[in-house]
Image: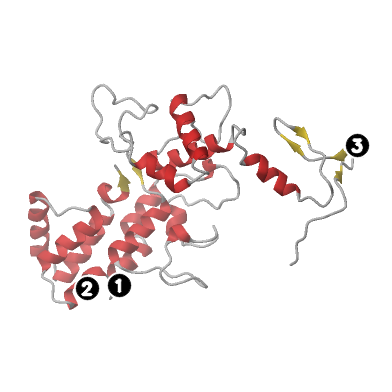
Amino acid sequence: MAIWVGRDGEITQPRTGQEMRPWLPGRGELDLPGEIDRRTALVDWLIAPENPFLAKVEVNRIWSHLMGRGLVDPIDDFRNSNPPSNPQLLNALANDFLENGYDRKQLINTILKSRVYQLDSAATDQNRRDRKYFSHYPVRRLSAEQVVDAITRLTAVQQTYEGLPGQILVTQLPGPDLGNEFMRMLGKPARNTACECERSNAPDLAQALELASGEFIDRSVRAPDNCFRTAQVAGRSIEEIVEDIHWGALSRPPNHQEHAAIAAHFEGAASEEEGLEDLLWAIINSKEFLFQH
């Protein structure tokens, strides 16, 4: 299929017969020669320093992805009657984003190094009811794509997608039609609209059943070349494998209570392999693994 830019003037409104010239917010109609690509004029306006919209909208979207809620919430609802929870912070981040040439990595680095991002998720009596001003870090479940990538990294069972490299992450997939039913069950949107509201992280019974007994996790836990079976072949002890699973899933070793519970479970398991399968499944279903906190 070939696509080209028309060079023969503007579009005519069929009902009124009026010529529809390019129009930009705050500037009005533009008088452009026919050979000028109208998309270039739109991009020039979008990234112009005097444009008050782009930097704030993008900053708010990235803040929402990192913090679970936008400074303007819902993040697609910019209007005078829905002001940001912290206008000064939004303006400061937007100005910094603009001055750095719309560098997203720089913006993310700034937010991640901030005190507000590094706050404890444990609420106090004073801020327990706060859902707006980021007085503590909001606990939230990982997105569908993040859950799949986390399970892939933990179990070392790589997911494959037709026509794509074998080591690709779900968060790198080029289209919404790729993925699996597990992701759709956890709220991955079809991306039929540009609204962020299309994605849902709300829990439901189908998600609980999929996490407890679904095919995707079962396949990863029982794979002959997953993390703990590879470790067994390499001669690592059961204690070392249990430590490895905890570090890979939770970034910490098991505590004394967990050690005792795991030891008691292995005593009743039919085999070490079955005990490790149960352990891996239990950790994947734990709140500590599924939630960002």
Of badges 3 and 1, the one in the foreground is 3
Residue 255 in percent (x, y) is at 11, 50
Few, some or many residues within 10 Å of mark 1 (<14, 14–19, 20+): some
Write down the quadrant of residue 225 in the picture: bottom left
Q: Quadrant of the C terminus?
A: top left
Q: Give the residue drawn at x 87%, y 48%.
A: 9
Q: Which residue is mark 2?
A: 229
Q: Amino acid at mark 2?
A: Arg
User: Is residue 71 in view from this perspective?
Assistant: no
Find out whether the residues at labels 1 and 2 contact each other: C-beta distance under 8 Å.
Answer: yes
Residue 50: x and y, percent? 62, 32
- Disc 1: which residue: 223
Name the residue beneath numbered marker 3.
16
Examine the rendered structure and indicate whether residue 108 appears above or below residue 149: above
Disc 3 from disc 2: Cα separation: 71 Å
| Direction from residue 39 to residue 241 in the image, left or right | left
For marks 3 and 1, give the CA distance: 65 Å
